[in-house]
Amino acid sequence: MTESDANPPVSPMSKRFRGFLPVVVDVETGGFDWNRHALLEIAAVPVDLDENGAFVLGETAAAHLVPAPGTEIDPKSLEVTGIRLDHPFRLAKPEKEALDHVFAKVRAAMKKHGCQRAILVGHNAHFDLNFLNAAVARTEHKRNPFHPFSVFDTVTLAGVAYGQTVLARAAAAAGLDWNADDAHSAVYDAEQTARLFCKIVNAWPKP
């Protein structure tokens, strides 16, 4: 065994965030109460590094979910999101299967960067984390890679960087495109939030 094998290089990602891997998450739901309303969509975008060490979007993992037994759906939420639960191409997964799919991609990204834990990044991040934690509790999932309560919130970051807290306005202030017709899709919102996060953090002096 060589010295380099015994002491592998420390990943810049793990050094930057104290062993955490930022993973941008967006959920679409059947309402605002994570204890009562269904989780309907989830998307997760691990943050990656390019060849110059800049933060960029990693590979998105996403799933549509079958509403968990016992959860409720407010029809007004479906009007906002445009989700059609009976759409033939929705290809929804049971909650445990959907979490398995997303968490596996997150753990692979953690392994790539030598990180011990994922930290959820979101716009109003505790909303997403609370729905995620509720699904983890319902399914008794044992391999949740996310920190149970710590988050990075792009509402705060965008407020500091651009004076904007609404995602669409923050994206515009950051020079990012925004398509209102695509908003309220978990994948679109997660990827736009990830672009916003990377833009802000890349502009911040490295510690």
Image: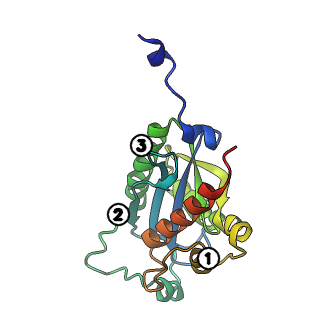
SS under mark 1:
helix
Q: Indicate the quadrant containing the C terminus: top left, top right, bottom left or bottom right.
A: top right
* Of pointers 1 and 2, the one earlier in the residue sequence: 2
**Which residue, given by chain and number where applicable, does mark 2 sit on?**
93
Q: Name the disc covering residue 108, or none.
A: 3
Measured Cα–Cα span from mark 1 to mark 2: 36 Å
Task: Mark yes or no: residue 46 visible.
Answer: no
SS under mark 2:
loop
Give the residue furthest to the front.
Answer: 52
Q: Residue sitting at 49 percent across and 39 percent down?
A: 113
Q: Please tell me whether residue 160 is drawn above or below residue 82 in the rendered image.
A: above
Q: Residue sitting at 69 percent across and 72 percent down?
A: 162
Measured Cα–Cα span from mark 3 to mark 1: 33 Å
Q: Crowding at label 2, few (<14), some or many (≥20) Cα neighbours within 10 Å?
A: some
Q: Name the disc covering residue 173, or none.
A: 1
SS under mark 3:
helix
Q: Crowding at label 3, few (<14), some or many (≥20) Cα neighbours within 10 Å?
A: few
Give the residue furthest to the top.
Answer: 1
Q: Which is closer to the viewer, label 3 or label 2?
A: 3
Dividing the picture into quadrants, the one containing residue 62 is bottom left
- Residue type highlighted by circle 3: Ala
Q: Is residue 54 left or right of residue 158?
A: left
